[in-house]
């Protein structure tokens, strides 16, 4: 197994900053990259606030919080990820963007380092194929909010080596997560099951089976889920839910995965959920 000490993270958004926080708290040196200075600053300040809040609540000491924050370096230069042993990409869920990032990472990151993607649905085999090191590419799918959720879904591309997969599993475990192994088919395991449930909840609303709040209460109180499916869809982002349903629909070719017209309409109208204040619910900005 490879020895991982320095982890590079691409993208300081919701997922990237959460992964950076957990990695730093688990003793890894972290280099957090984003292409935009305002995202990078926002992401870093968010981590600082979360670490301070945790210290106030007594989850860890303020010394621990300062030590973790001190392990995180930020950069606008992808070249600064050169010395990392593992890079976890958590950029926007767009195929062409991820391909471009992996082509660049393959050029700048030292030979032998592992390149992982936090993609929720894009094929790891296809991402790996744009690099010259496909055996060193794997999926590490974290759940939101990363510091709270226990799971990392590991995705093994066609060419991923045993050593790479075992190393990402051990790294996730060192980060206090449970690593579940999935093969590289559309939606992997989590979204193959979760997204059709969310999509069906949108159909239930679309067809007038029940109101938004009642659908969510039914599933929260009736099946012990922490959030109802529509609230969860807003939390994940309706644009992301639609993108994943499209991957399932196209990739598996079965009409049972067709995205609900209401979900498409909400996304077309710019209702993306919690991230921009409006989805099935309205949120204060
Ligand atoms: N970052 C860090 N910590 C957070 C947080 C965040 N963004 N949001 C909440 N927390 C922490 C709080 O600090 C609190 O910690 P303590 O109990 O130690 O004080 C704890 O989580 C509970 O928070 P709250 O009391 O504020 O709120 P809650 O009890 O309603 O829980 C929730 C909030 C954890 C988000 C819960 O509603 C939940 O588990 N929801 C389901 C989340 C889920 O399913 N996520 C997976 C989505 S799928 C995905 O990510 C993958 C994909 O590909 C789409």
Image (cartoon, rainbow, N blue to C red):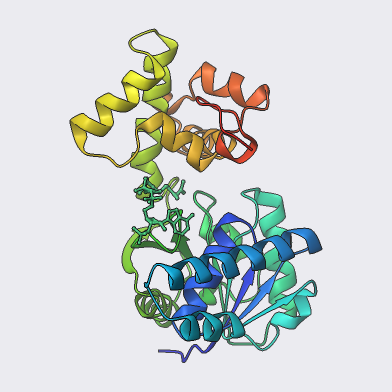
Q: Position of residue 32 (x, y in %)?
A: 66, 73
In the rendered image, the vertical position of residue 68 relative to residue 117, given as above or below? below
Residue beneath the point at 45% across and 73% down: 55
Residue beneath the point at 19% across and 29% down: 222
From the viewer's perspective, is 98 left or right of 157? Answer: right
Name the one closer to the observer, 34 or 258: 34
Residue beneath the point at 33% across and 10% down: 209
Q: Position of residue 270 (x, y in %)?
A: 67, 27
In the rendered image, the vertical position of residue 189 relative to residue 163, given as above or below? above
Question: Which image quarter holds the N terminus?
Answer: bottom left
Question: Which image quarter holds the C terminus?
Answer: top right
In the rendered image, the vertical position of residue 96 relative to residue 35, given as above or below? above
Q: Position of residue 81 (x, y in %)?
A: 69, 81
**Residue 213 falls in which quadrant of the image?**
top left
Name the residue furthest front.
Answer: 56
- In this rendering, the count of numbered labels is 0
Name the one closer to the observer, 56 or 114: 56
From the viewer's perspective, is 265 left or right of 255? Answer: right
**Residue 75 falls in which quadrant of the image?**
bottom right
From the viewer's perspective, is 93 left or right of 248? Answer: right
Name the residue furthest top.
Answer: 208
Can residue 138 be seen in this snapshot? Answer: no
**Residue 61 falls in which quadrant of the image?**
bottom left
Can residue 13 be seen in this snapshot? Answer: yes
Q: Position of residue 89 (x, y in %)?
A: 60, 65
């Amino acid at each position: 197994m490879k020895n991982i000490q320095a982890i590079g993270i691409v993208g300081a958004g919701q997922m990237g900053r959460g992964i950076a926080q957990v990695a730093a708290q688990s003793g890894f040196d972290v280099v957090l990259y984003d292409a935009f200075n305002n995202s990078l600053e926002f992401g870093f300040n968010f981590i600082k606030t979360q670490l301070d809040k945790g210290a106030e609540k007594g989850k860890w000491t303020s010394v621990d919080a300062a030590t973790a924050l001190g392990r995180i370096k930020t950069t606008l230069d992808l070249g600064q990820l050169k010395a990392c042993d593992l890079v976890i990409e958590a950029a926007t869920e767009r195929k062409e963007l991820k391909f471009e990032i992996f082509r660049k990472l393959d050029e700048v990151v030292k030979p032998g380092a592992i390149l992982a993607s936090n993609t929720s649905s894009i094929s790891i085999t296809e991402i790996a194929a744009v690099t010259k090191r496909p055996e060193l590419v794997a999926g590490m799918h974290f759940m939101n909010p990363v510091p709270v959720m226990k799971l990392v879904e590991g995705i093994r591309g066609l060419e991923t080596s045993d050593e790479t997969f075992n190393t990402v599993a051990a790294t996730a475990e060192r980060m206090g997560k449970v690593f579940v192994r999935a093969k590289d088919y559309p939606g992997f395991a989590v979204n193959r099951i979760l997204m059709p449930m969310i999509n069906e909840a949108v159909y239930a609303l679309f067809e007038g089976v029940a109101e938004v709040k009642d659908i969510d209460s039914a599933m929260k109180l009736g099946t012990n889920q922490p959030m109802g499916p529509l609230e969860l869809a807003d939390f994940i982002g309706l644009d992301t839910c639609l993108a994943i349903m499209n991957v399932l629909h196209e990739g598996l070719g079965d009409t049972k995965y067709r995205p609900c017209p209401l979900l498409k309409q909400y996304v077309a109208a710019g209702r993306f959920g919690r991230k921009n204040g409006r989805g099935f619910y309205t949120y204060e900005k």
